[in-house]
Amino acid sequence: MATDFKKALDKLVTASGGDWRVFIRQLGPLHAQWHVEHNAHQALLGFLLFHWELIQRFRAAGADQGLGGLTGIKPYTEPQLANFGAPYPLLDPVSAGDVGEFETFSLDIEAWHNDAHMLVGTAIGHNLMNPRTNVRRPEFWRLHYFINDRFEEQLARYSTDAASDTVAKLEAKPSAAAQV
């Protein structure tokens, strides 16, 4: 079930005992497991929903401030991404209530994100392609905060509900949850 990953993420937050370093160290295997299931088309949470949930737990564990310092993790800007050779190309917005457009957006941003991981990693001199270890790098989170911001923009176009409410509704639909 989609909630199994959410429960596992929540368990990591609890098990970390308020130590964001413990959370980050324990997150790698779970992140890698999701990627294996996702690549095998067996994951019950799609790319955007999984990473949105991941960022919520990252913040809950205090890792935003821990890994990002006093100002926390800040998303990359479009000019920064363009300087890495990964300009953000997606301009087609999701229409209100259109799950199919959301699925297309998710596939498109995921494809861009895969290249961005490699290009940003090459530019900074660190491997951002390994899901077991990339969660230890602030650059991973900066990229995913950027993606999360684009996701939340589309959530607002899709529904007038709060982002968390819209996410919950999408996750309640198994066919949508696995694709968004």
Image (cartoon, grey):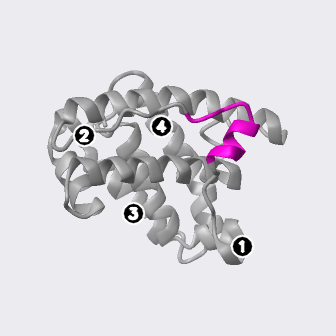
Left/right placement of residue 99 relative to residue 164 reads left
Nearest the viewer among 129 and 83 is 83
Task: Say whether residue 84 is magenta.
Answer: yes
Q: Earlier in the sequence, mark 4 or mark 3?
A: 3
Q: Which residue is mark 4?
A: 33
Disc number placed over residue 10 in the picture, else none: 3
Label 3 sits on what residue type?
Asp
Dot 2 crowding, Cα within 10 Å, few <14, some 14–19, many 20+: many
In percent of width and height, residue 85 lies at 72, 31
Residue type at numbered disc 2: Ala
Dot 4: element: helix
Looking at the rendered image, the quarter that the N terminus falls into is: top left
Quadrant hosting residue 138: bottom right
Q: Amino acid at mark 1?
A: Gly
Is 173 drawn above or below residue 54 in the view shown? above
Q: Work out whether 117 lies above or below 61.
A: above
User: Separation of disc 2 and disc 4 at Cα?
Assistant: 17 Å
**Which mark is first along the chain, 2 or 1?**
1
Mark nearer the viewer, 1 or 4: 1
Query: Which mark is on residue 177?
Result: 2
Name the residue that disc number 1 marks.
69
Q: Horizontally, is 146 left or right of 133 in the view?
A: left
Query: Magenta span covers which residues?
Result: 78-88
The quadrant of the picture occupied by the C terminus is top left
Pointer 2 with pointer 4, Cβ within 8 A: no
Specify whether residue 140 is painted magenta. no
Measured as percent of width and height from the top left, residue 28 is found at 58, 47
Q: Nearer the viewer, mark 2 or mark 3?
A: 2
